[in-house]
Image: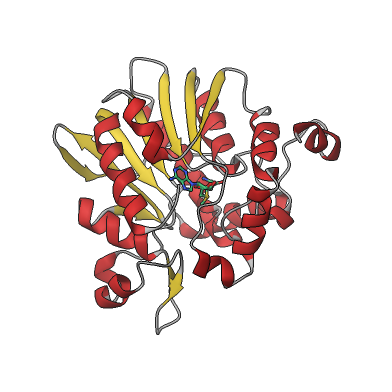
């Protein structure tokens, strides 16, 4: 399969729309910039940076981590854990659209081949390892306090996010960062009863039409309360036994090179208009 992608996209990573290989819309591409900010903040570590990515899909966020580690002149590793197999609830898949395309991509093992193709373009100073399995099965083999950054973007169903956050707290070093994707709204901003009633779903819209991943909203609130969130990218820092908000605005950032040109332009325009970046 990797050979097929090599022929389809020789010399470059490949993110075809038909495989939902880019997992968020153009308005969410700014989250990649926040990933680079997190690496900038974590680089104070005295050792090569170690990042754990839970949920990699086609490697779009993986390439951002790898480029950020390389750019901030550090060597390091990114360990990706993903089953690259079915995980969506039947009711979500029955709803069709992107879910059906994702299930087909995993059933045909296309997405794993695409991930392998794409990580082949990570900067060579950064080692990208992966373990194919559910994080629930892999986590027990990982030692405490070893990661500088744990990024949570696996299954967004509530019990899985609860699990992944619990393990992330154990796996991140003191001073390290836990972050994650798809916190479109925090619990204090929305109808908590609606979120509770929606936990069986991956993604829902409330009566005001606001889209959210209820499992992420609920689990993050239970674990950390209110967190710093940047366009849906949330982040906390471990300090001893506690977890605190992290300000990313002072960090250096860049727009990752593998983003599509249209997304790069949109991100750049957003950055300029926000006035947050020098
Ligand atoms: C939202 S996608 C990840 C997108 C990726 N981080 C990106 O931004 O390009 C969710 C991923 O989580 C994976 N996943 C589902 N259940 C998982 C589990 N229990 N442990 C680890 N990964 C899981 C899926 O296979 C899928 O690749």
Camera-side residue of 139 and 52: 139
Q: Looking at the rendering, in which quadrant would you find the N terminus?
A: top right
**Farthest bottom residue?**
207
Colouring chosen for the image of the structure: secondary structure
- Which residue occupies the extreme top position in the image? 47
Rendered position, 18 above or below 190 = above
Nearest the eye: 126 or 118: 118
Q: Residue furthest toward the left?
A: 241
State the image coordinates of residue 103 (x, y, percent, origin top left).
Answer: 62, 56
Residue 134 appears left or right of 1: left
Q: Is residue 234 left or right of residue 154?
A: left
Q: Residue at horizontal 42%, vertical 29%?
A: 51
Residue 275's x, y, as percent? 46, 55
* Residue 95 seen anywhere in this rendered image of the structure: yes
Which residue corresponds to the image point at 30% horizontal and 23% vertical from the top-left?
Answer: 143
Q: Position of residue 66 (x, y in %)?
A: 54, 29
| Residue at image coords 45%, 47% | 154
> How many numbered markers are drawn?
0
Q: To which quarter of the image does residue 58 belong?
A: top right
Along the horizontal axis of the image, is 71 left or right of 241?
right
- Using the image as rendered, state which of residue 78 and residue 234 is in the foreground: 78
Residue 267 in the image, given as x and y percentages of width and height:
58, 53
Q: Residue furthest right?
A: 7
In the visual, does 270 lie left or right of 194? right
Q: Is residue 191 above or below residue 99?
A: below
Up the image or down, 82 lies above or below 96; here it is above
**Residue 278 in view in this figure:** no
């Amino acid at each position: 399969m990797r050979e097929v992608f090599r022929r389809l996209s020789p010399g470059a990573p490949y993110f075809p729309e038909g495989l939902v290989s880019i997992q968020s819309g153009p308005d969410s591409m700014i989250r990649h910039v926040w990933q680079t900010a997190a690496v900038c903040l974590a680089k104070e570590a005295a050792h090569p940076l170690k990042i754990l990515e839970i949920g990699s899909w086609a490697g779009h966020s993986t390439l951002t981590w790898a480029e950020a580690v390389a750019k901030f002149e550090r060597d390091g590793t990114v360990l990706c854990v993903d089953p690259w197999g079915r995980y969506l609830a039947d009711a979500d898949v029955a709803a069709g659209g992107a879910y059906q395309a994702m299930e087909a991509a995993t059933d045909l093992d296309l997405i794993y081949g695409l991930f392998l193709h794409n990580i082949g373009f990570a900067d060579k100073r950064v080692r990208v390892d992966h373990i194919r399995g559910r994080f629930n099965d892999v986590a027990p083999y990982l030692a405490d306090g070893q990661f500088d950054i744990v990024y949570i973007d696996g299954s967004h169903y509530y019990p899985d996010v609860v699990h992944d956050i619990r393990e992330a707290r154990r796996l991140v070093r003191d001073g390290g960062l836990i972050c994650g994707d798809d916190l479109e709204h925090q619990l204090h901003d929305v109808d908590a009863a609606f979120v509770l009633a929606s936990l069986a779903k991956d993604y829902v819209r409330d009566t005001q039409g606001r889209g959210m991943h209820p499992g992420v909203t609920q689990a993050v609130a239970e674990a950390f309360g209110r967190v710093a969130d940047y366009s849906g990218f949330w982040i906390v820092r471990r300090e001893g036994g506690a977890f605190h908000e992290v300000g990313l605005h002072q960090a250096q950032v860049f727009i990752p090179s593998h983003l599509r040109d249209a997304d790069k332009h949109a991100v750049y325009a957003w950055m300029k208009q926000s006035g947050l970046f020098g």
